[in-house]
Image: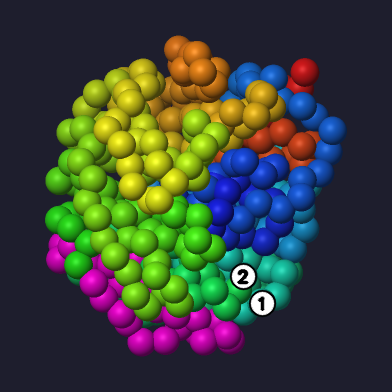
Amino acid sequence: MGRSGSGIALLGALCGCGRIGFGPPGGDTNRDPDAFVGSCVGDGTFQPQVVYAAGGAQDVTVGALGGDAAPDVVVTDILQSHAAVLINHGDGTFAPPFELTTEVNPISIDVASIDGDSLADIVVANSVSSTVSVLRNLGGNEFAPQVTYAAGMRPRSVALRDLSGDQRPDLTVVAYDNGMIHTRMNDGTGAFLSLSSDPVGAQPLELAVADLDQDGDRDIVALSAADAFIVRLNLGGGTSWTSTTFTTRSSPVHLALGDVDGVGGPDVIVSLGSSEKLAVHLNDGSGAFGPEVLVPAGAGPRGVATGDFDHDGDLDLATARLGNDVLSVIENRGSEGFAPPASYPTDSGPGSVVAADVNVDGALDLVVGNVNVGTISVFIANCR
């Protein structure tokens, strides 16, 4: 997931890190928000999981693959070298998955319309093959065979976001083995131009995209296994950047962006895999970040999503907890800080999570990828 744009939730055509979804403005900072549908005002709680076989769930995201308002789900199967698509029936229930061939070890996935139509296309980072697979959406649940692009040494995270300002999603990937970030600009037809590469710190794990300094250009955050995250501010056109490294706590695993304090633009949220906490780094408005504020999350947090789950104007957090087979939802109480996590049982091995209005009722739901058993868990929001 890397799982992205200007808002961590989205409705309609896609646009992010961690994770990413459909919904009203104020959600996922890796996505571009759009209008939302329905009259449900979420109360911040969720119904028990509904489990769907997905064939694999190393990473999970959502997109308008059918061109309608109901987001479909896409996952990667790292063992079988394919992506799987679960089409939304329109009410938050999903058809059985169909598979799309990728190269070896698909580890990260993102979706957006790369050719300007209303249908979200799919990109997948293939770790062992050191490539990105581009899967063009032909409509009617049909996809063109993959087109592959070189993506550095062992890519770990991929994003489709407009970096140049021409309204076309560009391709960005971080490569773990050589500590590089690689970008390919969209040529306007859905093909990607020659590779541009820059160092981004040791062992990058994940990337996310948002306008961090509020200048109208999308910037990049890359999470490093060396207990840090690197902020790359876009100086215009997606060709010139400044980089600053910020320290976080030990054992960082996943990354999300969202304006949790309501000022200064998107903040950085890092899950700390060997602890029971999330590290929140507040943005001062210029794309610089302060020391971490630790938020209790429960054992083994992995993927993180953000969204205003209780419709109070504050951005809440959700994290998939691999250590306990649990989804934790953490209410943001504004000036009072974060509430203790509320826990919801998942299937085995929850590692990724995305916030999305899957039943199109106006409230953000949650979709969790369970890597141990290749399923997704769908949690529908309760209304007030």
Q: Look at the numbered discs 2 and 1 and tell me whether their residues touch, using CB distance below 8 Å.
A: yes
Q: Is residue 291 visible?
A: yes
Q: Measure the alpha-carbon separation of dots 2 and 1.
A: 6 Å
x 50%, y 14%: residue: 336
Residue 67 versus residue 75 in the image, above or below: below
Identify the residue at the far right of this view.
Answer: 39
Residue at 61% x, 56% y: name it.
32
Q: Which residue is mark 2?
A: 113
**Left or right of 157 on screen, residue 199:** left
> Residue 240 at x, y = what percent?
34, 75
Vertical placement of residue 80 versus 263, above or below: below
116 vs 216, nearest the viewer: 216
Tell whether position 180 is magenta.
yes
Which image quarter is the C terminus in? top right
| Other residues around mark 1 within 10 Å, as few (<14) / some (14–19) / many (≥20) | some
Kindly state the secondary structure of the residue where label 2 is placed.
Answer: loop
Tag 1: residue type? Gly
Q: Which mark is residue 216?
A: none
